[in-house]
Amino acid sequence: MDFRLSAEEEALRQRVEEFVRAELVPLEPEFADAPDIFDGSRWKSRVKSSADPEIRRYLALMEGLEKKAEAAGLWHLDVPRQYGGMEVSNVALIAVTEELEKSAIPFELGNHVSNILYSCKGEQIDKYLWPCIRGEKTSAFGLSEPASGADPSMMQTTATPDGDYFVINGTKMFPTFADVADFVQLFARLPGTAGREGVTCFLIDTGTPGYRIARSIATIGGTEPCELVFEDCRVHKSQVLGEIGNGWALNQAWLGARRFQVGIRAHGKSQRVLRVVRELVRHEPARAGQIAATAGRFLGEIEALRALTYVGAWKADQKMDVRSEAANVKLFATELLHRIIDFALEVAGQSGLRKNHVLARAFRHARATRIVEGPSEIQRHIIQRALFREGAAALELT
């Protein structure tokens, strides 16, 4: 395995490194008390219509950074070249994200575009894909349900064929930003199917009759996902993303890409938390030695996480099946980050429990990452299934 970047990719990484040092780090004091909504991706969808002067101030700062990044040629790194992007490799994208995580400001180089939207075809490209790339539209991801929880193979939302249409009925839980999205990527199953079979993805515009947002749900992570209800919602067959019955593969493609990003972001956040710990005990020599020993043990795990993430990204570039690797990264990254922040809170003591303390905020977000996009139990199940599958294959060869 060779994780070295090409000359072009290394030059890109260096430009991002300079951008972080020159533009992001100096603004960190400004964002110390920023609202939680700025801690995640797609913050613009939530705040673009806000009249709150404080929100508008942060919005102006972020939009200014976006313009500088675009001017520096650091935009849409993961967008295919045919759509005007740079289409960097997975390894290069991980390297760039690693540089971005050296700043406490949650900044992304490009508008958030769901990777499965590149399956758009015909009129879908102009209606959904291009507007998302340009930042004119945003989408929500409708997968989880009240009864199926973290196992989408048990989804109950149905899409019943009716001539040139599908009639959709069901409920989706926790799609983030659905209340401000222009459309939802909705997963439903064909009648008479079970498990992974018959799952189909639809692009459904907000405001379509039969589709309503039942409520927003405030969470400890600062986001406000929604409950979506579909009651005899008629969707034309032209709104199918990809192929009918191929929704499970799209779902896995989306989750896999997200899990490697989770890994490298957790790597950066873990390092930042340990820097906070160092500052907390800098003037307390009586505690510093023991705390430094514990922090040192975490450093080895942090570097292991980095290596695990790069291995998975390299395999993805080789078009290998990386479901197990992605699950490993998601599990290791989120569990490790949670343990490190828990340790930091112990060091900080009661002061770290203040709602707006950097560690309290980090703890809330870290705990949420162990659940969203597949909780730890599901990741363990994926890993175990791959292990037994590989073991069975090995036995067949002996």
Image (cartoon, rainbow, N blue to C red):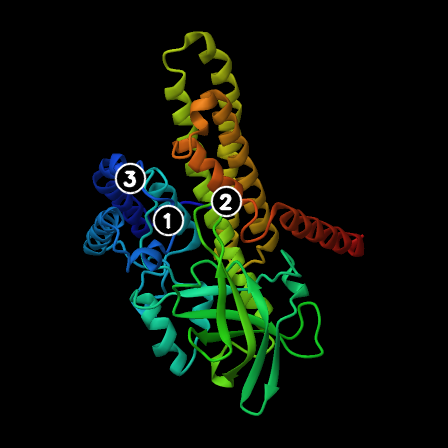
Q: Which residue is mark 1?
A: 37
User: Looking at the picture, how far across and down is residue 285, in whole percent?
Assistant: 42, 8
Q: Spatial distance from mark 1 to mark 3, Cα to Cα?
A: 12 Å
Q: Earlier in the sequence, mark 1 or mark 3?
A: 3
Closer to the eye: label 2 or 3: 3
Q: Which residue is mark 2?
A: 309
Front position in the image: 284 or 383:
284
User: For the residue marked with disc 1, what is the amino acid?
Assistant: Ile
Residue sitting farthest toward the top: 286
Location of residue 4 by image quarter: top left
Q: In this image, 107 relative to 205: left or right?
A: left
Marks 2/3: CA distance?
28 Å
Residue of label 3: 31
Residue 280 place in picture, x, y as percent? 39, 19
Displayed quadrant of residue 128: bottom left
At 61% from the left edge and 76% from the top edge, which residue is drawn? 245
Image point 49% across, 85% down: which residue? 236
What amino acid type should be assigned to the residue bearing mark 2?
A: Thr
- Residue 191 rendering spot, x and y as whole percentages: 68, 79
Indicate the secondary structure of the residue bearing disc 2: helix
Residue 23 can be seen in this image: yes
Residue 286 vertical placement versus 189 (above, below): above
Side of 343 where 70 appears, left or right: left
Labelled disc at residue 144: none
Instruction: Decide which of tag 2 and tag 3 comes sooner along the chain.
Output: 3
Circle nearer the N terminus (2, 1) = 1
**Tag in front: 2 or 1:** 1
Q: Secondary structure at mark 3?
A: helix
Within 10 Å of disc 2 (Cα), the crowding (few <14, some 14-19, many 20+) is many
The answer, for residue 314, to whether it is visible in the render is no
